[in-house]
Amino acid sequence: MPSVCFYFQVHQPYRLRNYSFFDIGHNHMYEDEEANKAIMLKVADKCYLPMNALLLRLIERYQGRFRFCFSMSGVFIEQMQQYAPRVLQSFKDLVATGCVEVLAETYAHSLSFLFSPDEWQDQIRLHDKIVKENFGVTPTAFRNTELIYNNDIARMAEEMGYKAVLTEGADQVINWRSPNFCYQPANCRRIRLLLKNYRLSDDIAFRFSNQGWEEYPLTADKYASWLFSLNGHGETINLFMDYETFGEHQWAETGIFQFMEALPGLVLDNPDFKFATPTEVAESSSPMARLDIPNYISWADAERDLSAWRGNDLQDDAMGACAALEESVKKTKDPDLLRVWRRMTTSDHFYYMCTKFFSDGDVHKYFSPYETPYDAYIFYMNALADLELTVRHKLEEQGVTSGRGAPKRSDAERAAIAFEDDISDTARMPSAEPETPVIRLKTH
């Protein structure tokens, strides 16, 4: 019996304010609290509260046969606690039904695996802890930030005890294989690998309201027929998408809520289909084959690789400066400084620095709070320079005055100054107007 496996990613970053060079050494408040609160409350009204209410009705209507999972970043849970306790309670109500799985992930929606596997594991443990404290469950399946994945990530997730790991069903790695089966990572013995069916997922997440799409309008009946056409050609249809698809990226006026309300009943009316969570799929399915993925893949952009975050010198320089600060931050043993630094590892900061154009670049621009990628780089590097100075002063107060734990010069500060000096007004402006996006998105 094929399963339909919904996974919804729920994340909001702590966005940085326009932190200038002249703030360095004087102002240690890096984040735009007003914007973070306003965006959380706006998306709560448009997406989280109405969609959570809809999903709870569906669980009750179908007496637990409708099942799905969330992956909520730790920084998202923190912001619910700070700004939107009613939203947090609505998520708790869903998890309490027993029909909703909560996945493990990095606490800060972090790219830490790319430079510090130890920090990556620490953030996963912190995330498991905040999930247990707020929802009373311990995650048993894992998804890495932005579905970034390779063999090494699978191996470490298995060593941490997870039963399943999720990633993108990227064409360049599955080749002729179908994403609609359960696989086993090449270097693992127990953990199961679930692949996103990106075509069916993106039909909802990106193409739903695109009037130029040949399948527009997408009705629940039409979509259910596509699912049913896969009967006999797979064991699980993995539909992975941002939760903000519902009501935020695809506005209520598009009919997205009505679509989602109708779909579960159509699926469950077919005796050959059911809904399942990732752990349930992993426990009930035998792997079709071993899948060897030595190079990184992700669910971002057309390339489905790391280029959304590591595609230019700005991103590489910023990530290198952030990584270089890890040891000295941890030597301070200051939980506040460590928390601030961990938020600087959030993938969104590097995503905002992407300089792609055309359709991918327009999507990056939609999500960014900054006018240009160069502004995102400057504000980030300025904030990181101040954090590095603060850490150095803290270590000096503690009597640590030499060695790698107390750098005499600030790499982040030097990079911020150099870039702000070198960049021209022309370089700050996009070189060309991006093409009209193929998806209907509204800015926060």
Image (cartoon, grey):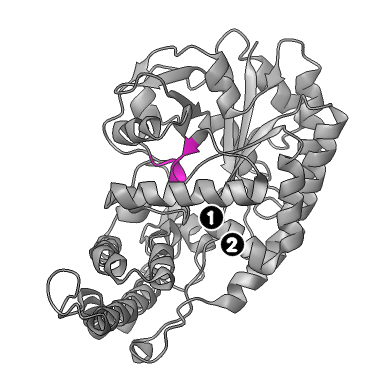
Q: Is residue 72 above or below residue 39?
A: above
At a point 85% along the width and 38% down the height, the residue shown is 57
Quick one: SS at disc 1? Answer: helix
Q: Closest to the observer: 40 or 139?
A: 139
Q: Is residue 127 above or below residue 82?
A: above
- Residue 407 included in the magenta stretch of the image: no
At a point 35% along the width and 16% down the height, the residue shown is 290
| Residue 149 visible within the image | yes
- Residue 147 included in the magenta stretch of the image: yes
Q: Closest to the observer: 242 or 60?
A: 60
Q: In x, y percent, where is residue 432?
A: 40, 66
- The answer to which quarter of the image holds residue 269 is top right
Q: In x, y percent, where is residue 435?
A: 48, 56
Q: Which residues are magenta?
A: 142-148
Query: How far is mark 1 from mark 2, CA to CA?
Result: 6 Å
What amino acid is at disc 2?
Glu
Packing grade of label 2 (10 A; few <14, some 14-19, many >=20) is some
Q: Is residue 345 above or below residue 103?
A: below
Q: In x, y percent, where is residue 87?
A: 73, 57
Q: Which mark is residue 321?
A: none
Residue with the most extreme right position: 61
At a point 29% along the width and 61% down the height, the residue shown is 319
Q: Is residue 434 left or right of residue 42?
A: left
Q: Which residue is mark 2?
A: 78
Q: Which residue is mark 1?
A: 74
Quick one: SS at disc 2? Answer: helix
- The answer to which quarter of the image holds residue 98 is top right
Q: Are marks 1 and 2 in contact (CB under 8 Å)?
A: yes
What amino acid is at disc 1?
Gly
Q: Closest to the observer: 431 or 422?
A: 422
| Residue 443 visible within the image | no
